Image: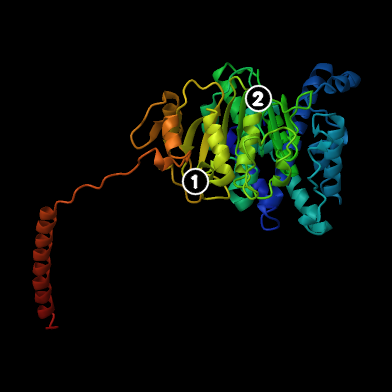
Amino acid sequence: MNEKINQDSINKALWAACDTFRGTISADTYKDFVLTMLFLKYISDVWQDHYDDYKKQYGDEPELIEEMLKNERFVLPKKASFYALHERRHEPGNGERIDQALHAIEEANGTKLKEAGKSVFQDISFNTDKLGEEKQKNTILRHLLEDFAKPELDLKPSRVGTLDVIGNAYEFLIKNFAASGGQKAGEFYTPPEVSDLIAELLDPQPGDTICDPACGSGSLLLKCAKKIRDNHGGTKDYALFGQEAIGSTWSLAKMNMFLHGEDNHKIEWGDTIRNPLLKDKNGNLMLFDVVTANPPFSLDKWGHDDAEHDPFGRFKRGVPPKTKGDYAFISHMVETLNPKSGVMGVVVPHGVLFRGSSEGVIRKQLIEENLLDAVIGLPEKLFYGTGIPAAILIFKHGKETQDVMFIDASREFKAGKNQNVLSPENIQKIVDTYREGQDVDKYAYVATLEEVRENDYNLNIPRYVDTFEEEEEIDLMAVRAERIQLKQQLDNLEVEMAGYLKELGYI
């Protein structure tokens, strides 16, 4: 089967593979098995493709083929390939064999699948009781291996072409898991339209270092990278950095990077606020040209107790409240911005715009330092796991004016059953408005620092963007005339009705 295939057929085959688990365990649990199997199948197919090529060229020299395969992007030990596992699928012990294969792949690839002692497959075990007792587990995993062996999921480069197809398939799965993952979905996924919007607003350039300190599965970083490649002839002159607190989500991010062909990345596993791991050789926080994140909204227990004595001085503007970590992430991000020309975009709940107390103090300081560039209000129900509307804050070093732009994009979206989405037109309007930096009636307003001060540093969007629509004046005489006409029609109908009733003998 050599014909090139389209994205849709891969996506459908992958989604069908999830049927193996449906009704047995929740999507939140089985997503890790399906995504990991996709990664294993892909690197096995690449390996097989290259092996077949070398065999054609050097058929009678197995030692030479062996040597050449050692230079592959991912080295694959013989017993660790998808095909070796598929061959033995009818034997007992599928879970144990898959786990051993993943461990062997980690060991064979040095630091590529490891970061500071943490390995990508560490939190993923196919040999788990979550899949039921031994016989049931073995059957489920046999079905999974058979699903991925179908011709539709032959992912050899000679068949599927570019890496994007595989990366897109991975993103498709993550998006669908997020849609069915309820409350937990927001932990690992930012909707693609929101990522697109942020990448457009931040406009990363070749040579930039880009960081997401709460990176989830890495979609925001990947969108920023794609924007540079698309706008600058496919260049890979940029570097991606991230940190993620949840181990299984960190693993998703690492696999996501590789499946998108992004080998030049550094994604750390750990709590960014309590233990930032992206540091320079002197132990100071690394500084980046572009910093972006969709951190957890109003995180409780974010690390308040240690913040006052933060060794990196991130909370010099004030310590955020104990039960709301929004300004902890904002403070961290601002401190990791390149002080000459760094730009930052962060998704926040609306409370960040107007809450008082210590948050009010931090907000005032950020505004007075002329770091805040724009406040963009988004529609409700855009994010998985929460229906509340959010906003994007843009911060910038080296601003030319002291103005702050307010955009109210909350009323323009494509309505969906469970989720609303931003259409390409909605996104373009926001981006164009931001770039032009002019007032737009009932949509955008450029406020001076003086106006923001007069509002006591409250950034609530309706204080600046007046969206009030005046109701049309009612013509009472026209309404009265219409009422008289309707009354006359009703009287005529009553007479007509009485005539019918009389004819039928009811009166």
Q: Amino acid at mark 1?
A: Pro
Q: Is residue 233 left or right of residue 485?
A: right
* Location of residue 300 in the rendering, given as x and y in whole percent from the top left corner: 65, 50
Q: Which residue is mark 1?
A: 389
Q: Residue at position x 76%, y 24% from top?
A: 280
How many labels sit on residues? 2
User: In this orientation, does residue 323 appear?
Assistant: yes
Q: Which residue is mark 2?
A: 288
Q: Is residue 372 left or right of residue 110?
A: left
* Location of residue 78 in the rendering, given as x and y in whole percent from the top left corner: 87, 33
Q: Residues within 10 Å of mark 2 (few under 14, many from 20)?
A: many
Q: Nearer the viewer, residue 358 or 271?
A: 358
Tag 2's secondary structure? loop
User: Please, which residue is most extreme toward the right here?
Assistant: 63
Give the spatial CA distance, label 1 vs label 2.
28 Å
Foreground label between 1 and 2? 2
CB under 8 Å between callouts 1 and 2? no
Q: Does label 1 or label 2 sit earlier along the sequence? A: 2
Q: Nearer the viewer, residue 321 or 182?
A: 321
Q: Residue at position x 71%, y 51% from top?
A: 29
Tag 1's secondary structure? loop
* Location of residue 402 in the rendering, given as x and y in whole percent from the top left corner: 47, 26
Q: Amino acid at mark 2?
A: Phe
Q: Residue at position x 71%, y 35% from top?
A: 243
Place residue 35 in its image quadrant: top right
